[in-house]
Amino acid sequence: MSAELRVAARVVELVRELAGSSAEAEVMVRHDAEALTRFANSSIHQNVASATTGVRLRLHAEGRTTGGSTTVVDADGLRALVERTLAAARVSPVDAAWPGLAPPAGLHPSSPEVGSFDEMTARADPALRAARVRDFVDAAGGLETAGYCRTVYVSAAFANTAGQAVEGRSAEAAMDGIARLDGADGVARLAASRLSAIDGAQLGARAAAKARAAGTPAELPPGHYEVVLEPDAVKDLLENLATFGFNGKSWAQRQSFAELGKQQFDPSVTIVDEPLGSRGEPAAGLPFDDEGTPRRSLVLVRDGVTRAVTHDRTSAAQAGAESTGHASPYSRSWGPQAGNLRLEAAGLPSSSTGGTGSVAESARPMVARVARGLLITDLWYTRVLDPKSLVVTGLTRNGVWLIEDGEIVSAVGNLRFTQSYPQALGPGRVLGIGAESVLLPESWGRARYAAPALHLAGWNITGNASG
């Protein structure tokens, strides 16, 4: 039994002692260790690391629900947590939507065993991350560079008063860097479950090649353009689909585009949430969610047909379904969200960086089929205008090029777009999917997305972003 599971079990005992046998409680104990090496002006300027053990308690007593947390895990700290959470529950409103506790259940058979993660990544020191930064900077060939390399280690356990008790560990690494030349930026990113899979030289060479190819950009008028989206841009589609489209709370409230059983996407589109990893890539997260529900692979779209949305226990109760293992500390408020989406590639998925050239290797055949259109590296500052149809506005970033007769003819200045993501992926709109996926880190959190390049029939460009 891990130290985290012993703490969780002790909190459950305290709840029974102080609140009685009728109270329901769930306890999540997490030890998070994150380290970051950041660089700018082609030099490391910051090494930071944090390690925290936190305890979260959710308590349901006399029809009322409340939660509390602490980082004080000694006997007095745990007792104080239960006492103040119980006091808060007594003055909280009645919770008519309380879905009950997750019943006892073992982890999914494909879940990684406790400890089956990369120790080097979990214990990586600054020198290991700095070596990858040095390789990135050297490979950029004198261009100004900036970015980060990070490692994350999590050890956690869950227990509740219904008898559920599970534990697990995970490790993750990521690198994100840019190279700049005369105001033109190129980017390269990669996520992995092993730091050894992060090749700083390959990423630096790719970022530099894109920066060199993005000089002297032309401006284009607004219009409806055929596009090839590289994996970094496709990641934004997956992130917004997970947050707003496949969100079980939004779906139950009819604020999502998702219609189960309907052909909403091109037949070439299959989207799967894979929290346990796949095809030799270990999981980046835990094999259970914050309600103790075991996680598993979930097919959201198969051959263009929407098959499922993600649920925690609350949204599942509202929808008359079962939890899919997507509870989080904020899922009752913001809805349950997938954090490991994979858009299935046309070939065998991999965690490739996409090569070292200015165009992702799997995107080259798509570029050759475009009569006139755009090659887009990255999307950023995206904001949802209409959640129901998932119309998103945002900007391009880190490289855009004009394609004519299958050839890249010039760099293009950054552009603003306004586009429904489901519509862009709709029947007949996906003209090609890359042969490989690139595993990419989320911008602000620890989710990751496996994204291939995409060739789409149309993308609404609504303006320029000069300056």
Image (spheres, rainbow, N blue to C red):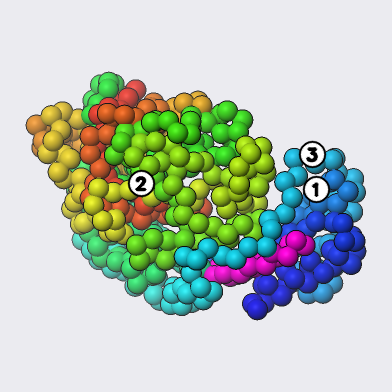
Residue contact between numbered discs 3 and 1, judged by CB atoms under 8 Å: no
* Separation of residues labelled 2 and 1 (CA atoms): 38 Å
Residue type at tag 3: Ala
Report helix, strand or loop for mark 1.
Answer: strand
Which percent across, then down, holds residue 129? 40, 70
The disc, 3 or 1, on the residue closer to the chain's N-terminal end is 1
Q: Does residue 67 lie above or below 165 as drawn?
A: above
* Separation of residues labelled 3 and 1 (CA atoms): 10 Å
Q: Does residue 217 lie above or below 296 as drawn?
A: above
- Residue 43 is at least partly visible in this image: no
Residue 316 lies in what quarter of the image? top right
Which percent across, then down, holds residue 39? 40, 61
Which circle marks residue 443 in the picture? none
Residues rendered magenta in the picture:
154-169
Residue 262 lies in what quarter of the image? top left
* Separation of residues labelled 3 and 2 (CA atoms): 37 Å
Residue type at tag 2: Leu
Prevailing secondary structure class for the magenta stretch in the rendered image: strand
Which percent across, then down, holds residue 449? 40, 51
Q: Quadrant of the C terminus?
A: top left
- Residue 59 is at least partly visible in this image: yes
Q: Which residue is mark 2?
A: 343
State the residue at coordinates (75%, 44%): 98
Q: Which residue is mark 3?
A: 96
Residue contact between numbered discs 3 and 2, judged by CB atoms under 8 Å: no
Q: Does residue 173 lie above or below 99 as drawn?
A: below
Q: Which residue is mark 1?
A: 65
